[in-house]
Image: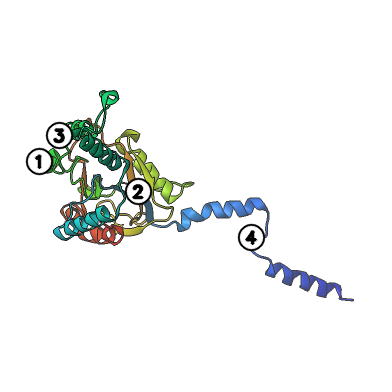
Amino acid sequence: MAAPGGRAALGLARGWRRPFWAGNLGSRSLSLAAAPSSGGSPWRLLGALCLQRPPVVSKALTPLQEEMAALLQQIEIERSRYSDHELRALDEAQRLAKRKADLYDDEDEQNILLIQDLEDMWEQKFQQFKPGARITEADKKNDRTSLHRKLDRNLVLLVKEKLGDQDVWMLPQAEWQPGETLRGTAERALATLSENNMEAKFLGNAPCGHYKFKFPQAIRTESSLGAKVFFFKALLLTGDFSQAEKKGHHVWVAKEELDDYLKPKYLAQVRRFLLDL
């Protein structure tokens, strides 16, 4: 049996081994709540949106592709079977041959629409069809605020933001708020564009890239050194900036035009995940 003094010493030793959080729930919550204010990160978190307008039309074929397409078309014609329309044309050709030889009575087929009449009607409709131009008015004017340009290319949305006393071009972004995911932050950045007029499909929940930068000296403090930006890809489904939006604050640009707007370090990070297939 242990002496009273030994039990006291044992209890004291157990008390030293107790975790610091093993007190009551109130003291634990209080210590966790006070932690961010004393050891908060000086870096702000931002969710950015890489919004792309996919190609509207297919790219023009190269001479080699045109030659290959013509060869495949010829092979398809030579190996294909007759369609219903072609079988009907052959049948009518046989009846016309019999009619010329006075071996076929067509008194009951005076009101039947012949295959040649159908083809003439289709040819007239085809002559009235005018395909849309690949080169639009926005292409001719080099209007980069318009979505109706470079129809066979991917376009990326850039916006002009105020960073200190500088106007900086970048991908649309918003600051992360407690309780939301980084993708939710990027979705909120999309919702603030053009008064919720645009819809997009996000490609995954994980960021496709990130970028870290320091604020200008004029607005940099010890508790706010800079920002860490996490990029999320999305494809534009519908919508555009309204006519009331001020031009000059946004552009839709192709990959090779990013050099005209983005700073070199920012551009290097964007090019890592931006593909133009």
Quadrant including the N terminus: bottom right
- Identified by mark 3, the residue type is Gln
Q: Of marks 3 and 4, which one's residue comes earlier in the chain?
A: 4
Q: CA distance from mark 4 to mark 1?
A: 67 Å
Secondary structure category for the residue under label 1: helix
Mark 2 lies on residue? 234
In x, y percent, where is residue 209?
Answer: 35, 59
Residue farthest toward the right in the current orientation of the protein: 1
Say above or below: 111 vs 187. Answer: above
Q: CA distance from mark 1 to mark 2?
A: 27 Å
Neighbour tally class for label 3: few under 14, some 14-19, many 20 plus, Cα within 10 Å = few
> Viewer-nearest of labels 3 and 4?
3
Mark 1 lies on residue? 141
> Viewer-nearest of labels 4 and 1?
1
- Identified by mark 4, the residue type is Trp
Q: How is the image coloured?
A: rainbow
Look at 27% across and 54% down and name the residue there: 76
> Along the line of sight, which residue is nearer the eye, 227 or 115?
115
Q: CA distance from mark 4 to mark 2?
A: 44 Å
* Residue 59 shown left or right of residue 172 in the figure: left
Q: CA distance from mark 3 to mark 4?
A: 83 Å
Is residue 169 shown to the viewer in this render? yes
Mark 3 lies on residue? 127
Q: Of marks 4 and 1, which one's residue comes earlier in the chain?
A: 4
Q: Of marks 1 and 2, which one's residue comes earlier in the chain?
A: 1
